[in-house]
Amino acid sequence: MSDRPAQQADEGWHRPGLGVAVVAAVAAVVAVGLIALPRDTAALPAIARHAMRIALPRWGTTEGVNEIVYGSRGFDTFGETFLLLAAVVAVVLLARGPEPRAEYVGEASAGRAEQAAADPEAPPDQQELQARRAEQEESEEQEPAPDHADEEPLGTPAPERSAAMTVIVRAAARVAAVPLAVAGVYLAAWGYAPGGGFPAGAVLTGVALLLYAALGHRAVGSAVRPAVLEPLELFGAAAIVAIGTVGAFVRGSFLQNWLPLAEQQTIRAGGTLQAFSGAELVEVGTGLTIAIFALLGMRHEWAGDEDES
Amino acid sequence: MIVANYLAAGAVFCLGLLAVLGRRNLVKIVMGLSLMESATYLLLVSLAYRKGSTAPVLAARPPGVSQRELVNGNVADPVLQNFCLTAVVIGVAVTAVFLTVVVRVAQHYRSVNADDVRELRG
């Protein structure tokens, strides 16, 4: 490892002259390309016109963007879905700890309480003392968080902990979470949201993060855990494969519609387009949540110092 | 003046590239990559815009306009909106992969400086 001070290593620019020269060259090429792009008065491309024309007669949907995402470009969306799955699997593999875990975050504090209850008299050995000292030094929290965020007394001095935000944040999160989640799912289910399951899944991930940030991990721990999210995500992926494969056998083309079309702007209006959108909601919602919480859960797995070995 | 949007997207892209090339802090490099990614979202949405257009939605039409007229009328490009919204979701997942690698590098090397991560250098 370098002997330079960390402060010096992180600050400043690396070969600024070369960087600016390369960026200036790229900027010139990009500017020439951008100026030649079609302007806002250009006619719509043929594929966009085609999508608008067939949205209602072929799919029964009033959303042009949904027709593109799950209809005309359905196979492309299928590929993107599995790209997302591959990214989530990569995060899970990279973030995996040395021991199997039931929750993404919060197991360290849960384990401390369990150990104290099971064996309160046994004195810690030298190795445990050393580990606890190291953990204490690296931890920002000097006291364990309360069991529930609402048990944190009002007026507790800053810094606030994620497990106990102020009562204003907690109340606002509680009020906002349910309407946000319902609105996201409703708009996707009735086919009103451009992109259907993609934005709705992102809304659900946002709600989980909002509750985690405001109320701590115990508020979301029962739902946001590997045993729940990972099977759900694989179910979403399997449902997309199944919808496409049945279309191939029944209609002769992968992801072709094989369900009857209901009246427009109802929950079954889009046929398999709506089913694909629903499966995408599950896939995106669980995939993003797994990726973010797996990242949040990476703690205390530092390599030993070189002079210790 | 949609060209101003295009050029703004190009400027944000170049700022991100400058961060990737000029910074050694791995977190700042990931931020630069995210900035480059965001520039493409701005470009895609700007490219989808049509002057005086409505959203590519056949429900809740403007008064006096039939669905058939709307289909053949002036709407924003739904294909580019589709590219943008799928790119946002994939971008979040890819950024999560980058950050996970950065955390592992930080834990292994005790540094987030790219110059310190050179064990693979031949």
Image (tube, coloured by chain):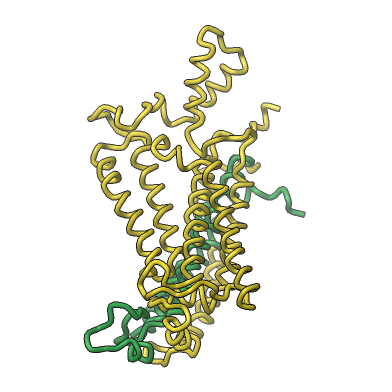
Chain colours: A yellow, B green
Q: Residue A200: which quarter of the image?
A: bottom left
Task: Residue lying at the far right in this picture: please name it.
Answer: B122
A277 shown above or below A209? below
Q: Would residue A47 appear left or right of A165 to someone viewing this image? A: right
Rendering coords of residue A80 (x, y %): 57, 66
Residue A304 sits in which quadrant? top right
Give A74 or A118, whichever is nearer the viewer.
Answer: A74
Q: Quadrant of residue A82?
A: bottom right
Q: Nearer the viewer, residue B92 or B13?
A: B92
Q: Front-most of A6 and A240?
A: A240
Up-down relation of residue B83 to residue A118 (above or below): below
Indicate left or right for B77 with A299 as reference.
Answer: left
**Apparent side of residue A177 relative to residue A282 in the rendered image (left or right):** left
**Residue ID at (49%, 37%):** A105
Q: How many marks?
A: 0
Quadrant in the picture for the N terminus of chain A: top right
Q: Identify which residue is drawn at 45% across, 63% down.
A: A197
Residue B25 screen position, x and y as percent? 54, 52
Residue for point 35% across, 54% down: A181
* Residue A206: percent from left, percent from top: 39, 52
Q: Position of residue A161 (x, y in %)?
A: 36, 35
- Residue A178 visible in the displayed image: yes
